[in-house]
Amino acid sequence: MIPWYRGFTGPIEITDKPGRYKVSGIINQVGDNLVEITELPVGMWTQEMKEFLEKEIMGTDKGPGAVKDYEEHHLVNTVHFKVQLTEKGMATALAEGLENKFKMVSYINTTNMVAFDPAGRIRKYNSPEEILTEFFHLRLEYYQKRKVISATTGGLTI
């Protein structure tokens, strides 16, 4: 069972470690010194990316930043940055990998999950499948109760 997020369009890949998934944003080179970011990794907010880009514009004591400027073209449910890099910044980003340079990767672990069990006690689960197995019979019981109530009320659910 692979994690899924409503509206997320980036890839979610299984890693070599069991229960660990690589979640990537989408970044593409669209010009000589221009990249386009159209999806951020799960857990990264638009504001975080803006702060990262601002730091890259300002640079450090060691030298100028890799980013000249950026534009935002977001819609209500989508992210869209156009980032203009310096020539040296683009060369460095391509050598390092665009995903790595712009921190477009996060990881999800599904091996240490804590939830309430059917008896209301807190319990550690080792996988999402273990949670499904634990709650399967309880869910069936509640489906049956709802079916009985629906039948006795003439199809109206309460």
Image (cartoon, rainbow, N blue to C red):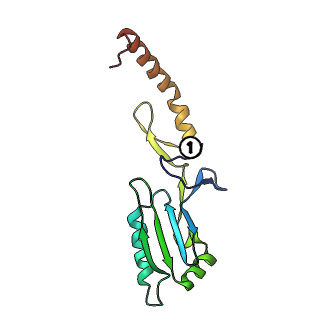
**Could you say which is closer to the camera, residue 136 or residue 39?**
39
Give percent across and percent down for residue 90: 57, 79
Q: Name the outermost residue toward the right.
A: 16
Q: Name the outermost residue toward the left.
A: 158
Q: Picture quarter containing residue 17?
A: bottom right
At numbered mark 1, what does the secondary structure look like: helix, strand or loop?
loop
Query: Residue at (54%, 58%) from the top-left corner?
Result: 107
154 relative position to 56: left or right: left
> Relative to 47, is 114 above or below?
above
Give percent across and percent down for residue 27: 55, 65
> Relative to 6, is 120 above or below?
above
**Could you say which is closer to the camera, residue 80 or residue 15?**
80
Mark 1 closeness class: few <14, some 14–19, many ≥20 residues within 10 Å: some
Query: Residue at (46%, 67%) from the top-left corner?
Result: 81
Quadrant including the C terminus: top left
Quadrant including the N terminus: top right
18 relative position to 65: left or right: right
Residue for badge 1: 127
Q: What kind of residue is marked 1?
A: Ser
- Number of numbered discs overlaid on the protein picture: 1
Give percent across and percent down for residue 88: 56, 85
Q: Picture quarter containing residue 53?
A: bottom left
Q: Name the outermost residue toward the front.
A: 31
**Could you say which is closer to the camera, residue 145 or residue 126?**
145
Give percent across and percent down for residue 52: 43, 73
Query: Residue at (41%, 78%) from the top-left corner?
Result: 55
